[in-house]
């Protein structure tokens, strides 16, 4: 047992780095240090002392690192911060209760399994999906290729397993045999993960590309439409003309796929038909795919919800599909989409779209991977505090499903990523006056097992923990588990 002041030092180091583990100040190495230190502290203290200490600092850090990124009213913001801290802290407590102070190397799998499952569980109950997932703190392209096999849960498992392994080495530093044994198991698997990452990046270099343009145009009309109808119609018409002028300039610069940022055009639902007819003619004359991101509303808005959608027109002058945002934010007064992937299939590629907040839900985006989408165009709208955090989530969704991502963002970072997550092009509206992002985007998808296998890793992880408890020699633990199962059944 280490001295008390040493255990406190582990906690203090973890408490400093946790403020840089995710959110606005994320530094990739920080979460690795946090997990090592907190796991050490948890194992060297009584279970509830460790849990309550980690839980407390987690709440404090959440309040600071997500400020402005999660735009909630004060009471609700503190509740959400506390819930996140619970799901982060509980795996430490369960691991401590299950394993006790001494453990074999096989027991080091308990913590990463719990950490993975509780991270997954939080994404299921959260209205923001995986938005705040710790996996997004990582930026090493070679490492994060693992999400093409396991989803983001693979990164989380590796984080937890590394912390467990290092703690095992600290517990057994005087035993060369145990150190050798643990490294023989750990290092080859991590090596395979990295080799796979290098191989996948190497094989993502498709020579066939298509030029895509994303138009940034913030258009807000904050007055009641019914009481300012003439002014709204004039504003909408002016914006309509501006957008088509910008779209024409994209055509002249060689873009074959052009789409607008989320809510680029506010239009009356009664005039939407005229807009579509205009777009059909324009697309046919210019031989392009045009994605019009519109906010279609009636004169009774906000009493009557609007439609936040993208309407795709093909070079043949036909409607490719109309997609409504499937996961509106809590503050949006809009109709929800049917959560069904819509795809334009051509001889050369499959094109589809989701809108902004939809990207936080990997299970939903996986449906687009199942449809063999090659290019996913994502109209979005952010704000300064969430930039570039929200845009970077897109690269994980692309790797998970093997398709290229083009995200056109108002009031934020617009990005284009290849299917391996490597950056093709970017444009930050806070740093540039440019309003159009261009990128040569690969038109062929990569194979991604996650598209087929889904979220198997969290379920394998919790199954392992439950089996371990059942075969445990600790009778009180087995009895607690069986009583819990009886209550649930």
Image: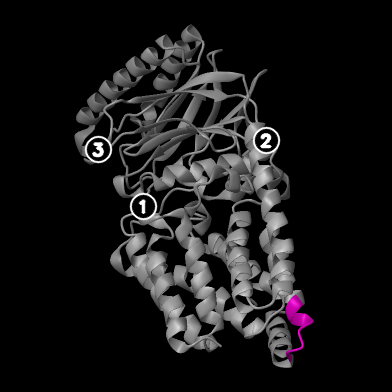
Q: Residues within 10 Å of mark 1 (few under 14, many from 20)?
A: few
Picture coordinates of residue 231, whole percent (x, y): 20, 29
Residue 482 vs residue 322, the one in the foreground: 482
Looking at the image, residue 484 lies above or below residue 383: below
Q: How many marks?
A: 3
- The secondary element bearing badge 3 is classed as helix
- Asked if the residue under mark 1 is in contact with the one under mark 3, i.e. CB atoms within 8 Å, the reply is no
Kindly report the distance in space between the C-alpha atoms of the residues bearing marks 3 and 1. Answer: 21 Å
Kindly identify which residue carries mark 1: 331
Position of 456 compared to 11: left or right?
A: right
Q: Which residues are magenta?
A: 468-474
Picture coordinates of residue 303, whole percent (x, y): 33, 48
Looking at the image, residue 186 lies above or below residue 45: above
Point out the image quarter for the C terminus: bottom right
Coloration of the structure image = one colour
Residue 175 vs residue 207, the one in the foreground: 175
Residue 228 vs residue 168, the one in the foreground: 168
- The secondary element bearing badge 1 is classed as loop
State whether residue 116 appears in this view: no
Kindly report the distance in space between the C-alpha atoms of the residues bearing marks 1 and 2. Answer: 30 Å
Kindly identify which residue carries mark 3: 226
Kindly identify which residue carries mark 2: 371
Q: Which residue is pictured at 67% across the width and 17% down the height? A: 347
Picture coordinates of residue 431, whole percent (x, y): 28, 34
């Amino acid at each position: 047992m280490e001295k008390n002041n040493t255990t406190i030092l582990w906690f203090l180091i973890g408490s400093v780095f946790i403020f840089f583990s995710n959110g606005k100040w994320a530094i990739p190495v920080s979460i690795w240090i946090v997990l090592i230190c907190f796991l050490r502290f948890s194992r060297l203290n009584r279970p509830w002392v460790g849990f309550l200490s980690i839980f407390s600092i987690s709440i404090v850090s959440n309040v600071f690192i997500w400020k402005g990124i999660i735009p909630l009213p004060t009471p609700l913001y503190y509740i959400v911060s506390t819930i996140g801290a619970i799901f982060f802290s509980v795996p430490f407590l369960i691991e401590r209760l299950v394993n006790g102070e001494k453990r074999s190397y096989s027991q080091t799998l308990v913590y990463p399994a719990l950490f993975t499952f509780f991270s997954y569980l939080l994404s299921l109950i959260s209205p923001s999906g995986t938005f705040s997932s710790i996996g997004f703190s990582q930026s090493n392209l070679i490492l994060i290729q693992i999400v093409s096999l396991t989803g983001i849960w693979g990164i989380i498992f590796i984080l937890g397993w590394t912390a467990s392994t290092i703690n095992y080495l600290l517990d057994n530093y005087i035993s060369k045999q145990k150190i050798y044994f643990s490294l023989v198991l750990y290092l080859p698997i991590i090596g395979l993960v990295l080799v796979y990452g290098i191989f996948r990046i190497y094989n993502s270099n498709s020579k066939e590309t298509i030029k895509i343009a994303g138009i940034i145009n913030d258009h807000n009309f904050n007055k009641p439409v019914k009481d300012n109808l003439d002014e709204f119609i004039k504003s909408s018409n002016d914006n309509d003309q501006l957008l088509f002028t910008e779209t024409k300039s994209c055509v002249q610069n060689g873009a074959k796929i052009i789409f607008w940022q989320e809510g680029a055009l506010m239009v009356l639902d009664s005039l939407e038909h005229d807009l579509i007819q205009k777009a059909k003619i324009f697309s046919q004359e210019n031989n392009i795919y045009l994605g019009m991101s519109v906010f279609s509303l009636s004169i009774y808005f906000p009493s009557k919800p609007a439609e936040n959608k993208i309407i795709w027109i093909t070079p043949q002058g036909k409607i490719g599909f109309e997609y409504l945002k499937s996961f509106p934010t809590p503050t949006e007064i809009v109709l929800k989409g049917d959560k069904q992937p819509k795809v334009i299939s051509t001889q050369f590629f499959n094109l589809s779209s989701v809108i902004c907040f939809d990207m936080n839900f990997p299970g939903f985006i996986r449906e687009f991977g199942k449809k063999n989408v090659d290019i996913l165009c994502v109209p979005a709208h952010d704000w300064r505090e969430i930039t570039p955090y929200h845009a970077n989530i897109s690269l994980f969704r692309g790797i998970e499903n093997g398709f290229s991502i083009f995200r056109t963002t108002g009031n934020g970072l617009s990005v284009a990523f290849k299917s391996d997550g490597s950056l093709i092009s970017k444009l930050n509206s806070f740093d540039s006056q440019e309003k159009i992002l261009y990128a040569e985007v690969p038109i062929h998808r990569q194979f991604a097992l996650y598209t087929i296998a889904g979220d198997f890793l969290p379920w394998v992880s919790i199954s392992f923990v439950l089996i371990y408890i059942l075969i445990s020699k600790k009778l009180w633990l087995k009895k607690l588990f069986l009583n819990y199962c009886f209550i649930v059944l």
